[in-house]
Image: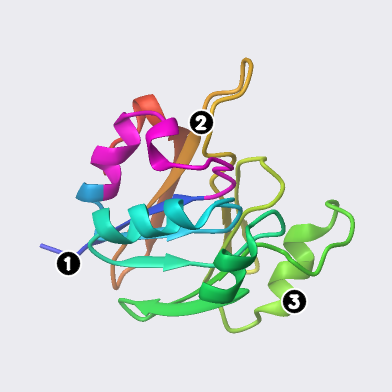
Amino acid sequence: MTDSTYILVLADTHVATLELLPQRLHQLIKDADYVVHCGDFTELRVVEDLRSLAKHFIGVYGNTDAPEVKELLPAEAFIEIHGKKIAVTHPYFGGPPWRLEEELAERYPIADIILFGHTHDACSVHKNGVLLFNPGQGYPMFITQASVGILKVTAEGVEGRISSVDNAVLF
């Protein structure tokens, strides 16, 4: 049996408190081995709530985050799980959204996985052996459902999927 680590990936939640997000998300946060938030929490309370619920929490600040969030969290983070190097960012450096995946791959050349937010568009693509993964927006708006990403990381590889919060399961 392979040792697996489950990572819940969030981004662009844009809320003042975690209670404003879908209730299903709270259980996913508690069940995941890691919770990674790719920026735009908006308020410090969301960071604090995630830290208190998650077994392990990694977060970076985004462009709409309060000054307190930007003081607390880095612009980018790096972790290694089962030998896989993971970069986490909210592309604070700006620029046009087209070519973003290529720019991220160039910016983090040693990463096996690049987790990012900012665009609100879900993305799971492989480029030159690197998984570029954006969970989409973490809050529901009009007809767009809140979405999350889930990664299963083993020494053998990575499986990822993006789904609506209401339908998400940890593999």
* Residue stretch rendered in magenta on the structure: 11-29
Q: In the displayed image of the protein, which residue is found farthest to the top?
A: 143
Q: Nearer the viewer, mark 2 or mark 1?
A: 2
| Residue 146 drawn above or below residue 84 | above
Q: Position of residue 45 (x, y in %)?
A: 43, 53
Mark 2, residue position = 146
Secondary element type, mark 2: loop
Residue 24 in magenta? yes
Mark 1, residue position = 3
Q: Position of residue 167 (x, y in %)?
A: 36, 26
| Residue 93 drawn above or below residue 167 | below
* Numbered badge on residue 170: none
Q: For the point 61% across and 69% down, which residue is it? A: 70
Q: For the point 16% across and 65% down, which residue is it? A: 2
Q: Position of residue 54 (x, y in %)?
A: 27, 57
The residue type indicated by label 2 comes to: Ala
Position of 106 with respect to 131 (left or right) is right
| Residue 87 drawn above or below residue 50 | below
Tell which circle, 3 or 2, labels the residue nearer the N-terminal end: 3
Residue 24 in which image quadrant: top left
Secondary element type, mark 1: loop
Q: Position of residue 34 (x, y in %)?
A: 31, 62
| Residue 30 drawn above or below residue 23 | below
Secondary element type, mark 3: helix
Position of 114 with respect to 9 (left or right) is right
Q: For the point 64% across and 17% down, which residue is it? A: 142
Mark 3, residue position = 106
Residue 61 in magenta? no
